[in-house]
């Protein structure tokens, strides 16, 4: 057997392979014996049909394909590994011919990983608009805690305000006719954050509990119900009860209720820890964007078009899944976006994603950054918490879909390399 390798202008490795007559004949005989074990040939027991009979029964081309599948994987693997080529696709056969002398000629090709030289990526000088938590950030977090633990309390002796909740019965009419679905009893309405028709909640301010009255509103012109949109309406109201929001005091009792903290100081320390982590995460995010923009701009790399097309297909698949999960029609949205414009944008984004992935891979190789089983386990637990499911369910999904494991691995590797770059960069604030 002889193998001739040549790299073409498309960054593909072209392989001209020649199998000698004896090697081809031996492979052909082995293929016939294997196929005979699984093919029912009338008049012969399984495995006993001669090659000539088998050829008539299933065809010579079928057997030849079996020969190729038995010979080529090993040859491809050895040629690529021996010469230290890095590929980005599976080898494909462009041409094969079983010659008259019994030998076999094959021409195949495989896409190679684009060659590039990384710029210096350690000790990069990075300037960012540094994010800093507001001075009132702690107060906002505490206010959020109070909001979550607030209660509604019935008030007496005063009229409703725009900050109250009101319990009402109501019935709406347009042109003297009752509005379909426009009535309810015991409805609790937040006057400060109402999503009712504009002007509805405002007319419930300054009213007494137990009072009955009518209000007039106009349905918006873009209202979803054609029967009432743009029309004047009257609503008969009975205000049953006025409630106000009561906020708890910030004390040790609340701290224990929030997260089993011993006291207020422990609660505040935990909030500060969260605020500090959020600040760091935001600054890391900003630094990451600058770091990769710098690496991409300083790395000369030509990506072959088939790689970009495959990445675009993957992006479209992700987009379709995301859109359909939201209950929308993918094809309609694509048509509305405009094919040519979207194709151009996706092409650029796909190329950027490929370059970034290759840079990450090369840095990981240079620095011996690896994904460990502990990394995978931590990510699985993180995902299970994010989606409110169990670790076991995530593991089952990964086992069913090998691509999911690969994606998970790539995600973790990206995070580890990114953290390495941040840890080794000189990050300062823009003046």
Image (spheres, rainbow, N blue to C red):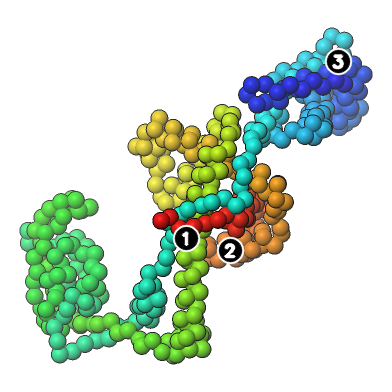
* Horizontal arrangement in the rendering, residue 169 relative to residue 107 (left or right): left
- Image position, residue 250 (x, y; %): 38, 86
Q: Residue at x 27, y 86 (%)?
A: 153
Tell how many labels: 3
Between 308 and 314, the one nearer to me in the picture = 308
Does residue 260 appear anywhere in the picture?
Answer: yes
Mark 1 vs 2, N-terminal side: 1
**Which mark is in front, 1 or 2?**
1
State if disc 1 and disc 3 touch (CB < 8 Å). no
Q: Which mark is residue 282?
A: 1
**Which mark is in front, 3 or 1?**
1
Residue on which disc 2 sits: 382
Mark 1 vs mark 2, CA separation in Å: 19 Å
Mark 2 vs 3, N-terminal side: 3
- Image height check: is 322 above or below 25? below
Which class describes the residues within 10 Å of circle 1: few (<14), some (14-19), or many (20+)? Answer: some
* Horizontal arrangement in the rendering, residue 314 relative to residue 242 (left or right): right
Q: Residue at x 40, y 37 (%)?
A: 334
- Image position, residue 261 (x, y; %): 51, 85
Q: Which mark is residue 407?
A: none
Mark 3 vs mark 1, CA separation in Å: 64 Å
- Indicate the secondary structure of the residue bearing disc 1: helix
Q: Which mark is residue 103?
A: 3
Between 127 and 271, the one nearer to me in the picture = 127
Mark 2 vs mark 3, CA separation in Å: 56 Å
- Indicate the secondary structure of the residue bearing disc 2: helix
- Image position, residue 404 (x, y; %): 62, 50
State if disc 2 and disc 1 touch (CB < 8 Å). no
Which class describes the residues within 10 Å of circle 3: few (<14), some (14-19), or many (20+)? Answer: some
Does residue 306 appear anywhere in the picture?
Answer: no
**Which mark is in front, 2 or 3?**
2
């Amino acid at each position: 057997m002889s193998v001739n390798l040549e790299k073409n202008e498309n960054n593909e490795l072209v392989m001209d392979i020649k199998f000698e007559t004896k090697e081809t004949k031996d492979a052909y005989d082995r293929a016939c014996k294997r196929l005979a074990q699984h093919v029912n040939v009338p008049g012969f027991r399984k495995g006993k049909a001669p090659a000539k009979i088998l050829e008539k029964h299933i065809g010579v081309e079928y057997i030849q394909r079996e020969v190729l599948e038995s010979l080529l994987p090993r040859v491809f693997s050895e040629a690529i590994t021996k010469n230290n080529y890095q590929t980005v696709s599976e080898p494909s056969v462009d041409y094969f011919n079983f010659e008259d002398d019994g030998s076999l000629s094959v021409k195949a090709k495989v896409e190679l990983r684009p060659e590039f030289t990384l710029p210096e990526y350690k000790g990069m000088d990075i300037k960012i608009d540094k994010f800093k938590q507001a001075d009132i950030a702690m107060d906002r977090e505490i206010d959020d805690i109070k909001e979550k633990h607030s209660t509604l309390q019935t008030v007496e002796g005063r009229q409703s305000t725009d900050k109250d909740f009101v319990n009402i019965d109501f019935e709406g009419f347009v042109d003297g006719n009752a509005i379909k679905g426009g009535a309810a009893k015991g409805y609790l309405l937040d006057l400060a954050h109402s999503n009712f028709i504009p002007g509805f909640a405002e007319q419930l301010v300054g009213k007494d509990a137990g009072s009955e009255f009518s209000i007039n509103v106009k349905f918006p012109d873009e209202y979803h119900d054609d029967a009432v949109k743009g029309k004047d309406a009257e609503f008969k109201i009975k205000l049953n009860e006025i409630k106000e929001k009561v906020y708890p005091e910030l004390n040790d009792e609340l701290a224990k209720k929030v997260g089993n903290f011993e006291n207020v100081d422990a609660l505040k320390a935990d909030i500060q820890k969260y605020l500090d982590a959020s600040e760091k995460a935001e600054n890391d995010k900003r630094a990451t964007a600058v770091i990769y923009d710098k690496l991409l701009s300083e790395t000369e790399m030509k990506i072959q078009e088939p790689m970009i097309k495959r990445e675009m297909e993957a992006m479209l698949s992700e987009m379709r899944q995301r859109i359909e999960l939201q209950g929308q029609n993918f094809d309609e949205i694509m048509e509305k976006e405009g094919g040519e414009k979207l194709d151009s944008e996706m092409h650029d984004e796909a190329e950027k994603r490929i370059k970034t992935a290759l840079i990450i891979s090369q840095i990981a190789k240079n620095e011996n950054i690896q994904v460990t089983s502990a990394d995978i386990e931590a990510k699985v637990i993180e995902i299970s918490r994010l989606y409110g499911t169990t670790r076991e369910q995530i593991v089952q999904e990964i086992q069913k879909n090998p691509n999911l494991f690969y994606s998970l691995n790539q995600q973790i590797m990206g995070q580890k390399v990114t953290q390495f770059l941040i840890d080794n960069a000189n990050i300062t604030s823009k003046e």
